[in-house]
C-alpha cells in the first residue's frame, strides 16, 4: 500500500509539472492593453515539448526571408472569428482590426549542445523546444488606430516571454561548419520597429512586410500536410478575393543559385529594404 501511495504521489507531481509547462490560453485580441507576458495573447502554446500555434493560428513562411543576425524564425497569423484580410496583388493584404501576427526568433541547438545558425532553413510549423534556444517573439497587432509592435523576450528557463518595450541586447556564439560566429543580437524597442515597418514615408503608417501575395505564394509543410499558403489562408477564412496560386505573383528565393542573379538581387532587396 505504501509503495502504491508513493507511485501515486510521483505520478501526480509529474502531471502537475507538465501542466505548469504548458499554456492553454485561447487566442485573444487585446484592443487597448499590452499584456506583460506573451502567453496572455494565446497565439502560441507550449505542449508536448514544442511551441505550437494556438487555436486557429496559422503558421507561414516567406519565399525570401529577411536577414536577422542568423536567427531562425517561426511565424504565425491569427484573426478573430469571422474576420478576413482582403487580397491585394501588388501590396500587403488589407488586414482587419484584431489581426495578430507573431514572429519568434531562435537559434537551433546542435547535437553537442552548441548554438547554430537558424537562417539556413525555413520557418517551421512547430518548434521542438529541446532543439532550439528561444530569443524573442515580436507581436504585430492591428488595432483601431493602426498597427502596434511589441517585443517579448524569452526568460532563461524558456517558459515565458516578457514584454520589453525598451528592447534588449544579448550576445551569442554560434558554430557554423566548425567556425565560431559572434553575434551581438539586438531586440528592437517599440520605436525601432517602425524603422522596418514604416514603408510609406508619406503616411508614416506602420504595417506588416511579408504578408503579401508575392512573399506567401509557396508550399508549406503544415502538421496535417503540404499545401499552398494562399489556398490555406482562403480555406481558413483568413483571405478573400484571391485568385488561384498560378495567377498570383511570386517572389523567387534569393538563395536559389539556379536563378538569374538579377532576379535574386531584386528578391533580396524587396524583403530587406
Image (spheres, helix red, strand yellow):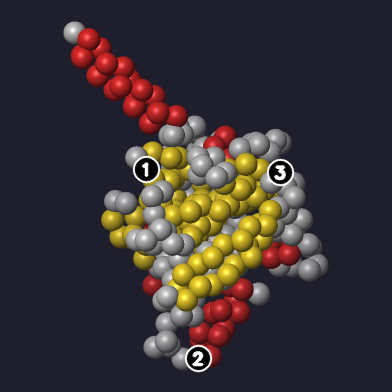
Instruction: Tell me the mark number nearer the camera, choosing from 2 and 1.
Output: 1
Q: In the rendered view, does 187 fall on the left or right side of 203? A: left
What x and y, as percent, mark residue 116?
Answer: 45, 66
Residue appearing at x 66%, y 43% in the figure: 163
What x and y, as percent, mark residue 108?
Answer: 44, 60
Question: Which of the pair 242/186 is nearer the observer?
Answer: 186
Work out how far the residue at label 2 is from the one at label 1, CA to CA, in angstroms.
Answer: 41 Å
Question: Which of the pair 48/8 is nearer the observer?
Answer: 8
Residue appearing at x 66%, y 75% in the figure: 273
- SS for callout 2: helix
Q: Quadrant of the N terminus?
A: top left
Q: Label 3, on which residue?
A: 144
* Residue 235 higher or lower than 182, as above or below: above
Instruction: Tell me the mark number nearer the camera, choosing from 2 and 3.
Output: 2
* Residue 12 higher or lower than 106, as above or below: above
**Badge 2 density bin: few <14, some 14–19, many ≥20, Cα 10 Å:** few
Work out how far the residue at label 3 is from the one at label 1, CA to CA, in angstroms.
Answer: 36 Å
- SS for callout 1: loop
Instruction: Tell me the mark number nearer the camera, choosing from 3 and 1.
Output: 1
Q: Earlier in the sequence, mark 3 or mark 1?
A: 1
Q: Label 2, on which residue?
A: 261
Q: Label 1, on which residue?
A: 49
Work out how far the residue at label 2 is from the one at label 3, CA to CA, in angstroms.
Answer: 42 Å
Q: Residue furthest front?
A: 2
Residue appearing at x 28%, y 56% in the figure: 225
- SS for callout 3: loop
**Badge 3 density bin: few <14, some 14–19, many ≥20, Cα 10 Å:** few
Q: Earlier in the sequence, mark 2 or mark 3?
A: 3
Amino acid at each position: 500500500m505504501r509503495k502504491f501511495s508513493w507511485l501515486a504521489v510521483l505520478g501526480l507531481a509529474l502531471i502537475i509539472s507538465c501542466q505548469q509547462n504548458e499554456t492553454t490560453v485561447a487566442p485573444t485580441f487585446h484592443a487597448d492593453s499590452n499584456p506583460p507576458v506573451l502567453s496572455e495573447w494565446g497565439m502560441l502554446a507550449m505542449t508536448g515539448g514544442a511551441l505550437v500555434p494556438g487555436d486557429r493560428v496559422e503558421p507561414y513562411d516567406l519565399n525570401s526571408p529577411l536577414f536577422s543576425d542568423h536567427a531562425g524564425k517561426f511565424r504565425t497569423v491569427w484573426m478573430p472569428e469571422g474576420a478576413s484580410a482582403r487580397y491585394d496583388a501588388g501590396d500587403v493584404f488589407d488586414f482587419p482590426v484584431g489581426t495578430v501576427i507573431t514572429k519568434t526568433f531562435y537559434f537551433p541547438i546542435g547535437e553537442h549542445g552548441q548554438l547554430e545558425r537558424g537562417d539556413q532553413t525555413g520557418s517551421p510549423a512547430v518548434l521542438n523546444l529541446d532543439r532550439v534556444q528561444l530569443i524573442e517573439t515580436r507581436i504585430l497587432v492591428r488595432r483601431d488606430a493602426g498597427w502596434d509592435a511589441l517585443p517579448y523576450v524569452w526568460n532563461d528557463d524558456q517558459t515565458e516571454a516578457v514584454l520589453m518595450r525598451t528592447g534588449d541586447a544579448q550576445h551569442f556564439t554560434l558554430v557554423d561548419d566548425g567556425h565560431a560566429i559572434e553575434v551581438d543580437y539586438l531586440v528592437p524597442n517599440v520605436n525601432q520597429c517602425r524603422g522596418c515597418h514604416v514603408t510609406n514615408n508619406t503616411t508614416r503608417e506602420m504595417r506588416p512586410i511579408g504578408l503579401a501575395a508575392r512573399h506567401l505564394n509557396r508550399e508549406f509543410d503544415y502538421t496535417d500536410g503540404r499545401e499552398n499558403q494562399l489556398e490555406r489562408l482562403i480555406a481558413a477564412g483568413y483571405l478573400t478575393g484571391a485568385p488561384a496560386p498560378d495567377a498570383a505573383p511570386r517572389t523567387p528565393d534569393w538563395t536559389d543559385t539556379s536563378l538569374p542573379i538579377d532576379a535574386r538581387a531584386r528578391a533580396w532587396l524587396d524583403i530587406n529594404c
